[in-house]
Image (spheres, coloured by chain):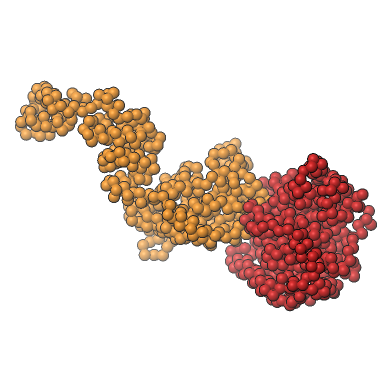
Chain colours: A orange, B red
């Protein structure tokens, strides 16, 4: 998609983020994931006759925090509305949401350093429950299942829906937007960002048009819940819609479903079949009256945002933007990095280690830094040993870092145990260099006849003889001296 | 003994119980016996009778009294039997809302008002009949058979709290809970010669009361005397964190207020009572008009100042009400889909299950769901629901303006006394019986109905007293003055003739 395409793609996203409150939006049931079916329920979230909702104030604070982090206007007098439709996972027959007076309006988010994606609004709402379609035959689970079971553990869980303007034009931008949004929500502590558990889900609105022509008809792809699926769904939709347009046909305004297995989207319902949600103000709740002081307090105590952190890393620690991005965006890496820097070790070297060997290790093992045994102390100690010349980069790379990651412990102790300290006595090295020269007269001839490249061979031989412990600088000096 | 008990007021029964003159068990059994004799097949005011539970509760109260527990701790309603409208959840008992769709549905929790009644020492005897989901003015829409007016079993007791009104009038219980969305406490109170109070919106918790129209619903007390009524409101009202629309004010001691005011002064001097032409429609029947004019005279004689007030916008009340109430109802009743509770129809697929289960809604309920769904539909919302809410605001302002020159407003409660079964088959004609009570709900104000006399056929006629928001105490004071000094004869329905 990065390549030049015939049609312009216009993408707007609606991201549903589950707020990290201990209890549900309108009752005191737990929001904990993984409970037995219908364990976290009560008459209120099951919609029993006569129950009333009571708003969870923590959820409101989280929504305000999200709004502040995304530069939104906060409406202190927003209200809730009922959005009505029938489905067995929606116990009351309506979802308590916000229609014409959401808690946040406007706002923006920047991706790729300078691409601004504007926001329409953020509103609060409760989640629905879950249907489990049961059947003897696994293939029939979705359609034509024998019966369906209702699990209302998730019903009433607080969500915010973050609605962007149609400001994105590629799958890369859309994915970058959701990634950055996720980082922000995690950094301010309002969402755990766990996409597998459904804490962050996304509806994609996408249309195509020719440059200079009016916007095309959009399709909405519902409930896409991984970065990969977002990219695939958009790419598939581009192909599908452009094929229609190329053939002179029209794109139908409709809701579609992305199916992971096939990577295709399928029509769920057309505009004609779309729900009339019959919104009206929720009479069981009074309009909010958020104190200005609360908004100010939350604004003042806002944690550092990912973009702020990245910028700080570049300016304060003088590391490249790319490295700053990798480290600052990962809570665990950032923590270990900042602690190690505080030990007085070169931030550039630490950053190189993190983005180099450590990241490679984590990627291979598919784990996060928090799952390793590496401590900031031993990491700083190891880099300090390199800085002091006690060990070489290579020794650290080949013989120390992996053990620190896997078993922990002290770098110094490993150096002592395995006798890894560099040989820094010039006379000792000179003697070894002399031995190498004596044993390789042919190469000496080549060097003397002008082949400077052969010098590397001698260095390698010396390293081999010292098990990598000889100081490379001293080797070079010796070779230059003895081969003159 | 039995008659001696059932003729007592709630306050007298409490006194008898606390002074160990009569045990709570004896009181409870006397009322249960009367219910068993006279209700089933006749009045039909109870849908469910909870004999065992009631006797068990009464015995517990007796043992606490004998053990010498502090009398105040036994509660404001100690030893008094109460009937609960079957729209209100009571744990362990069936709560049906008078509908087939909830037939057999057992409450899994107590409504706040039920909890309050029990913790204040009242003994719930059972669940009272009502129009299905409180939608009706005659009790004819109940799925469990209509309830009859004890004054004349050929007439309706009113609705929707018809069972509550009939049960209190028939002395099946001295206290009953009703609910009032557009007049459902005051209209049946008027039809059965009782005192019925619709408190200020937010005064009484709605938690646990099956919602009809959330922005209008309010539970309230139905009793034979003003003081019993004040006692029950005091016990049932108060801020409830489980109801976000409940008002956080201190509880008031109405009996104390009456004592320090009318009972001491024996005059209503200084009280300005508003009368509005807009509140005395041409459709008033002659006896009702006469009773109302008499009431004005009674108040004049008691020293109150009668002032004329204007309420020009209340003529829009019914139109406004029949948009807002059905709209909210259509939403509130969405949950009755047969999936989790109540009656589920067996059908081939989900849509059919929904459809078939909903056939258990009666005709009037279905009509209101249809009305409300239409009014909220996209493209109609602005013209109907939004407009109605704007009109509602104007009606509220009408009352606000009127209350600048008066403390209370009086009107007839209903245009005419109780009608006969089947007499109002046209829904619109039925809706008109609430024309004088609906404006009070729209404005969220407190309103009470008290008996103001009888028509030529001996049917009771109601007087409505409306107060400022949260000024129930002034209403009670004026109602008590009327009860004591109006000279309106205290008659009783001749129930024994039925057996």
Q: Position of residue B36 (x, y in %)?
A: 88, 49
Residue A430 placement, left or right of B369:
left
Please say if B474 is above or below A204: below
**Residue placed most toward the observer, A95 or A65:** A65
Query: Which residue appears at 26% of the width and 42% of the height?
Result: A348
Query: Which residue appears at 33% of the width and 46% of the height?
Result: A325
The number of numbered discs placed on residues in the rendered structure image is: 0
Please say if A460 is above or below A314: above
Please say if B48 is above or below A467: below
Mark yes or no: residue A291 visible: yes
Mark yes or no: residue A99 visible: no
Please say if A49 is above or below A468: below
Q: Position of residue B80 (x, y in %)?
A: 81, 50
**Residue placed most toward the observer, A222 or B109:** B109
Q: Position of residue A328 (x, y in %)?
A: 35, 45
Query: Which residue appears at 76% of the width and 76% of the height?
Result: B306
Residue B305 placement, left or right of B193:
left
Q: Position of residue B350 (x, y in %)?
A: 64, 48
Query: Which residue appears at 40% of the width and 37% of the height?
Result: A370
Residue B49 placement, left or right of A354:
right
Quarter of the image where one finds residue B146: bottom right
């Amino acid at each position: 998609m990065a390549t030049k395409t015939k049609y312009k793609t216009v993408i707007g996203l609606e991201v549903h983020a589950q707020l990290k409150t201990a209890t549900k939006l309108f009752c005191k049931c737990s929001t904990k994931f993984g409970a037995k079916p219908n364990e976290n329920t009560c008459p209120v979230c099951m919609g029993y006759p006569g129950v009333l909702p009571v708003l969870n104030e923590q959820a409101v604070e989280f929504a305000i925090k999200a709004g502040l982090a995304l530069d939104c206007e906060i409406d202190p007098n927003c209200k809730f509305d009922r959005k009505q439709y029938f489905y067995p996972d929606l116990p009351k027959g309506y979802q308590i949401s916000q229609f014409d007076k959401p808690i946040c309006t406007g706002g923006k988010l920047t991706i790729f350093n300078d691409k601004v994606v504007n926001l329409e609004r953020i509103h609060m709402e409760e989640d629905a429950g879950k249907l489990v379609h049961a059947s003897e035959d696994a293939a029939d689970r979705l359609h034509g299942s024998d019966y369906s079971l209702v699990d209302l553990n998730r019903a009433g869980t607080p969500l915010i829906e973050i609605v962007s303007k149609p400001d994105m034009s590629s799958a890369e931008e859309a994915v970058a937007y959701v990634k950055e949004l996720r980082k922000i929500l995690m950094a301010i502590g309002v969402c755990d960002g766990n996409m597998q558990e459904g804490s962050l889900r996304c509806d994609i609105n996408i249309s195509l048009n020719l440059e200079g022509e009016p916007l095309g008809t959009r399709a909405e792809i519902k409930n896409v819940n991984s970065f990969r699926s977002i990219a695939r769904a958009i790419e598939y939709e581009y192909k599908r819609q452009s094929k229609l347009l190329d053939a002179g046909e029209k794109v139908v305004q409709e809701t579609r479903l992305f199916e992971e297995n096939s990577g295709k989207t399928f029509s769920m319902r057309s505009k004609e079949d779309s729900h009339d949600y019959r919104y009206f103000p929720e009479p069981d709740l009074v309009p909010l009256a958020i104190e200005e002081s609360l908004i100010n307090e939350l604004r003042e105590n806002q944690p550092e945002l990912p973009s702020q952190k990245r910028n700080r890393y570049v300016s304060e620690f003088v590391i490249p933007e790319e490295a700053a991005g990798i480290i600052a965006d990962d809570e665990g890496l950032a923590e270990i990095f900042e602690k190690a820097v505080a030990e007085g070790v070169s931030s550039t070297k630490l950053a190189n280690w993190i983005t180099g060997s450590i990241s490679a290790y984590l990627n291979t093992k598919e784990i996060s830094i928090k799952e390793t045994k590496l401590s900031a102390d031993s990491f700083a100690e190891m880099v300090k040993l390199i800085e002091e010349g006690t060990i070489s980069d290579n020794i650290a790379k080949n013989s120390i870092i992996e053990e620190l990651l896997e078993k922990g412990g002290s770098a110094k102790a490993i150096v002592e145990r395995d006798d890894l300290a560099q040989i820094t006595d010039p006379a000792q090295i000179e003697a070894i260099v002399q031995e190498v020269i004596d044993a390789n007269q042919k190469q000496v001839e080549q060097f003397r006849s002008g082949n400077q490249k052969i010098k590397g061979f001698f260095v390698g031989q010396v390293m081999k003889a010292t098990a990598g412990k000889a100081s490379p600088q001293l080797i070079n000096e010796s070779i230059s001296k003895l081969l003159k | 003994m039995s008659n001696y008990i059932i003729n007592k007021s709630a306050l007298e029964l409490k006194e008898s119980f606390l002074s160990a003159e009569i045990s709570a068990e004896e009181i409870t059994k006397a009322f249960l016996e009367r219910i068993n004799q006279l209700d089933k097949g006749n009045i039909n005011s109870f849908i469910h009778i909870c004999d065992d539970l009631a006797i068990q509760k009464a015995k517990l109260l007796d043992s606490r009294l004998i053990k010498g527990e502090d009398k105040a701790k036994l509660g404001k309603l100690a030893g008094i039997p109460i009937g609960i409208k079957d729209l209100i959840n009571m744990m362990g008992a069936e709560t049906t809302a008078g509908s087939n769709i909830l037939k057999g549905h057992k409450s899994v929790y107590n409504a706040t008002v039920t909890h309050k009644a029990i913790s204040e020492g009242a003994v719930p005897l059972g669940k009272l009949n009502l129009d299905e989901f409180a939608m009706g003015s005659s009790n004819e829409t109940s799925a469990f058979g209509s309830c009859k007016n004890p004054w004349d079993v050929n007439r309706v007791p009113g609705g929707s709290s018809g069972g509550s009104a009939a049960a209190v009038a028939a002395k099946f219980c001295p206290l009953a809970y009703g609910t009032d969305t557009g007049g459902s406490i005051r209209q049946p109170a008027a039809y059965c010669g009782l005192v019925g109070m619709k408190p200020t919106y937010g005064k009484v918790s709605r938690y646990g009361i099956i919602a009809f129209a959330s922005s209008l619903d309010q539970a309230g007390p139905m009793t034979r005397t003003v003081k019993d009524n004040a006692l029950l409101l005091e016990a049932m009202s108060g801020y409830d964190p489980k109801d976000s629309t409940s008002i956080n004010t201190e509880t008031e001691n109405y009996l104390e207020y009456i004592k320090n005011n009318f009972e001491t002064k024996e005059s209503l001097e200084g009280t300005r009572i508003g009368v509005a032409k807009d509140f005395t429609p041409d459709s008033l029947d002659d006896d009702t008009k006469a009773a109302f004019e008499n009431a004005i005279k009674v108040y004049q004689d008691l020293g109150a100042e009668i002032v004329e007030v204007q309420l020009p916008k209340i003529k829009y009340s019914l139109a406004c009400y029949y948009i807002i109430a059905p709209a909210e109802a259509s939403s509130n009743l969405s949950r009755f889909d047969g999936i989790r509770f109540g009656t589920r129809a067996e059908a081939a697929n989900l849509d059919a299950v929904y459809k078939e289960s909903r056939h258990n809604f009666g005709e009037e309920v279905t009509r209101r769901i249809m009305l409300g769904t239409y009014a909220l539909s996209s493209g109609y919302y602005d013209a109907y629901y939004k407009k109605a809410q704007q009109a509602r605001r104007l009606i509220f302002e009408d009352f606000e303006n009127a209350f600048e020159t008066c403390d209370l407003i009086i009107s007839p409660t209903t245009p005419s006394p109780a009608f006969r079964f089947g007499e109002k088959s046209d829904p619109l004609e039925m809706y008109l019986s609430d024309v004088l009570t609906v404006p009070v709900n729209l404005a969220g104000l407190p309103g009470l109905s008290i008996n103001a006399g009888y028509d030529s056929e001996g049917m009771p006629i109601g007087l409505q007293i409306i107060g400022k928001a949260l000024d129930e105490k002034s209403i009670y004071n004026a109602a008590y003055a009327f009860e004591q000094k109006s000279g309106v004869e205290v008659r009783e329905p001749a129930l024994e003739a039925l057996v």
